[in-house]
Image (tube, helix red, strand yellow):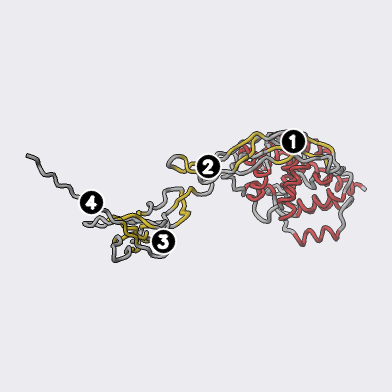
Amino acid sequence: MYKLISCTLLVVFHFSITEGNSPKYTHYAPYTLLELQCDQCPPGTFVRYDCTAEKATECAPCPSNHFTNEWNSYKDCQYCSAVCKELQVTKQECSSTTNRICECTDGFFLDVEFCSPHKECPPGYGVVQQGTPDSDTVCGECPKGMFSNVTSSTAPCHRQTDCKKLGRKVLQKGSSTHDTVCKEESSSSCEIDVTLCEEALFRFPAPPENWIMTLIQRFSSSALTSQQINKIQETHNAKEQPFYLFKLYKSQSKADDSFNPLIKDLKECEKGVFNLLRPLNLTTKHAMMLMQSLPGKRVKPDDIEKTLKTCERPKHLMKLFSLWRNRNKGNTIEGLKLLKMAQFPRILRKRMKKLGQFLSGDSMYSLYQKIILEINGNQTQAVKLEGLL
């Protein structure tokens, strides 16, 4: 006996719903299994109800903190990324059509999951490729004729100064870590009107009685006029007058014979200042930082760069102090005490502290006593001679 096998033929009908030019997605209608081509939903929305043979796709807007950034057939919107982490900033905010995008703040890059600081290129190396929020700094050794004298994550190598093009001779040959220093045709640009030792000497606290009158009598016979002396007395207080009298005297007296006995002592003092400052390989960055840390008006950046290029070490630093003093009519010894040195490199901080101590310490006090005895002694001798005559 044969069994009757019954087969059902399943026929699938293809049905297409068209709504403009929007992209489509395939959907099989329940029960009928009709293959429908439904319209996708635009960015910022999701599919609430699939299309049917009678109705188009029904889209709904994404709820708060959710998004879709393309035409889609999603039944839900995607959840926006969490708020940005430490050392990150928001590059793109969450919206119905965009996800929240975070990136590392300036000076940092994404290293696996955390923001790390960009690598700093040491002196002799420059930045070949700047770091980005997604990549680290790339350093490269400065080629011949180029230099970098700073530790930086942004500074490239710079071309060394060509002294020949400037019509000057080479004072100090450049290297990968410092620029070429050119010699000025005239050394006047590096001259200092009053040295740090002279300034400390004539600005020493607690002068003896009638000290200003003693100096006036010593200076007036050779270089200063009564008009100039009166102007200094009118313009400056009693504490500052000795310094400005000496400064004027020095500028007008080509042969400084009034202090011949002290010249040797002053040179020894200046030698001590040189020894303190000579170890400093002062970069442009640190020179700018030093001058900005002094109170009052700042020395112009162009003057700082010119001084570093034209004046040999350590005279360039003494010239910078002289520029600051003249610009502010200031007191360098007091200015050193007011330096804000927290950001200075350790060696610069240490040397500035020692310089301030040296210029107001025991050796300067001994030199000060010596000049008082010298000048007062000469004045006393002059009075005695006048009495005998």
x and y, in percent, of residue 46 in the image: 34, 59
Q: Amino acid at mark 2?
A: Ser
* C-alpha gap between disc 1 and disc 3: 62 Å
Report the disc number at residue 327: none
Which picture quadrant has residue 113?
top left
- Tell me the residue that label 4 is attached to: 10
Residue 158, x across and y down, in percent? 70, 41
Q: Quadrant of residue 124?
A: top right
**Relative to residue 182, is residue 42 drawn left or right?**
left
Residue at 86% over, 54% down: 224
For disc 1, the marked residue is 145
> Gap in Å between the C-alphas at discs 1 and 4?
84 Å
Residue type, label 1: Gly
Of the two numbered discs 3 and 2 on the same chain, state the one appearing first in sequence. 3
User: Mark number for residue 22?
Assistant: 3
SS type, badge 1: loop
Q: Earlier in the sequence, mark 1 or mark 4?
A: 4
Vertical order, 104 against 228 (above or below): above
**Element type at marker 3?**
loop
Mark 3, Cα crowd under 10 Å, few <14 / some 14-19 / many 20+, is few
Q: Which dot, 3 or 4, sits closer to the camera?
A: 4
Which residue is tagged 2?
135
Closest to the camera, between mark 2 and mark 1, is: 2
Quadrant location of residue 168? top right
Q: Earlier in the sequence, mark 2 or mark 1?
A: 2
Residue positioned 86% across, 59% down in the render: 226
Q: CA distance from mark 4 to mark 2?
A: 59 Å
Q: Are marks 1 and 3 in contact (CB under 8 Å)?
A: no
